[in-house]
Image (cartoon, helix red, strand yellow):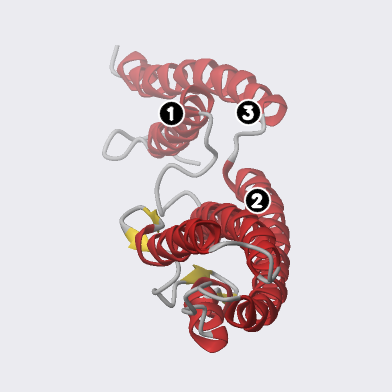
Amino acid sequence: MSLGVLNNISAVYAQNNLANTQASLSKTLQQLSSGSRINSGADDAAGLSLANALQAASTALSQSAKNASEGVDFLQVADGALAQVTNLLNRAVTLATEASNGVLNTSQQAAANAEYQNILTEIGNIDTKTEYNGINVFSTAAAVYTSDGTVSQTDAATALGSVVTTVNLSGDLTSAANAQTELAKITTAIGGVASVRGTAGANINTLQAVSNVMSTESTNTLAAENDVTATDYGQATSNMSKYQILMQTGIAALAQANSTQQLVTKLLQ
């Protein structure tokens, strides 16, 4: 190789290698300081796309778990109200049974009927005024959305009004005969409310299971995203040591390459 001064090829090689080493060291230091292996699309375009998709999926799953939990709360409000309806109907059974007895006088019959009418009014209030987050739980066809589908709550949410209407709990325990007729209706209503609570309970169990599944899936998806993006500190610290040494040797090599051309002046002496 001839000795010349127009182009210092050795210095160019050394400078290019030094620039590459500096870029690699800078990237490694960024990974160490951020905790993320991928800090831009240039680091790993495919990995970044996968990580973003996993992160979006984890976010959707996490919110779906919350949606399901809120659905459980909604139905538990309905179930609690239905429990009170059952208590009222049980009291109505007592009153109707008492009023069915032909030995009650007019005043006693009227008193039993007055309490019974109050019970019917209260059941009507429960039907129309029981709310969750401003939503009437017995008149709104609420549904819970999750990322893997929609779990309907319609049957449990609207059934109380149907039970009250179907059995037509509207009779005056004004006589033993009327009381006996009403007693049969009350018994039917108790069975209907029990059925509604069973449906609500089944939906609660389903939503709780959905919430648990979604939470688990969200955690696992987040773990997968972490595997794609997280910095491997063992590898990164090893790379940092390597690039720091290469930086030192590269600077030394560049200095040596620059000093080599100075030998030309020796020929001119």
249, 124: nearer the viewer = 124
Left or right relative to 108: residue 103: right
Residue located beneath label 2 in the image: 215
Q: Amino acid at mark 2?
A: Ser
Residue nearer the viewer, 219 or 143: 143
Q: Is residue 91 left or right of residue 119?
A: right
Sequence-first disc among 3 and 2: 2
Badge 2 element: helix
- Does residue 230 lie above or below 149 as drawn? above
Secondary structure found at label 3: helix
Residue that carries the numbered disc 3 in the rendered image: 236
| Amino acid tagged 1 | Ser
Q: Amino acid at mark 3?
A: Ala
Q: Residue at the bottom extreme? A: 166
Along the line of sight, which residue is nearer the eye, 73 or 264? 73
Distance of label 1 from label 2 (alpha carbons) = 38 Å
**Structural distance between the alpha carbons of marks 3 and 1:** 11 Å
Mark closer to the chain start, 3 or 1: 1
Identify the residue under disc 1.
26
